[in-house]
Image (cartoon, rainbow, N blue to C red):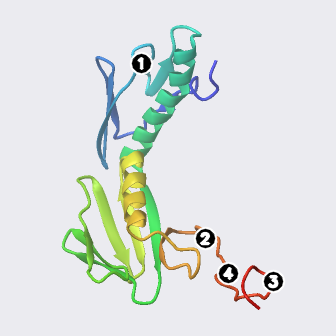
Amino acid sequence: MSRIGRLSIAIPSGVTVQVADHEVKVKGPKGELSLRYASPIEVAVDAGAVTVARPDEGKRSRQLHGLTRTLIANMVNGVTRGFSKQLEIQGVGYRAQMQGKSLGLQLGFSHPVSFEPPKGIDIKVEGTNKILISGADKQQVGQIAAQIRGLRPPEPYKGKGIRYEGERVRRKLGKAGKTAGAGGKK
């Protein structure tokens, strides 16, 4: 039996969970999320808790058991507390600001970059170099953070770019200079 899959998920007050036709809908103060789960898995709501069960010990059932339980637990956590990621911008002249609902970025390009967040995602800028991304859907928050980071990932020579808070970037030394015995003329 899966150690993660057999744990029940407590439903906090103010959250409703509905299961119908292989779909789980979770509604709470931060929003509403839904998940279509695979057919061998069985999800039940009883006595203020959600339980996930598998009908057999087949490989596919074992694979999906813990995954489905974790996805539902993330949904319950998302509609109650929400998820967030923080990005840092490093580099001379690199900055961020909100322009209405869109995020405006100066990243060393010849033009400013504008990023429009999808519905359900909130973006806030603290100062000029910290971006806070928050929302109820854990996967979507991580995806948006990765897309913003992908606009200008940190480069290994000077460390300029957008990085996750606390991310360590391995630095390279760069060109050390020409040596006499390294294949060049003396």
Asked if residue 85 lies left or right of residue 174, the reply is: left
Mark 3 → mark 4, Cα distance in angstroms: 20 Å
Amino acid at pointer 1 = Ala
Specify whether residue 82 is in view. no
- Which comes sooner in the sequence, label 3 or label 4? 4
Q: Quadrant of the N terminus?
A: top right
Q: Which mark is residue 173?
A: 4
Is label 3 or label 2 in front?
A: 3
Where does label 1 land, which residue? 44
Q: Residue furthest left?
A: 100
Residue 5 is situated, as x and y percent measured from the top left of the image, at 56, 25
Where does label 3 land, which residue? 181
Q: Residues within 10 Å of mark 4 (few under 14, many from 20)?
A: few
Query: Residue at the spot x=55%, y=8% of the render?
Result: 56
Amino acid at pointer 4 = Leu
Q: Which mark is residue 169?
A: 2
Mark 3 → mark 2, Cα distance in angstroms: 32 Å
- Which comes sooner in the sequence, label 1 or label 2? 1
Asked if residue 99 lies left or right of residue 77, the reply is: left
Q: Judging from the image, what secondary structure is the residue with disc 3 in?
A: loop
Q: Judging from the image, what secondary structure is the residue with disc 4 in?
A: loop
Q: Judging from the image, what secondary structure is the residue with disc 2 in?
A: loop
- Which comes sooner in the sequence, label 1 or label 3? 1
Query: Residue at the spot x=37%, y=79% of the render?
Result: 107
Image height check: is 6 above or below 135?
A: above
Mark 2 → mark 4, Cα distance in angstroms: 13 Å
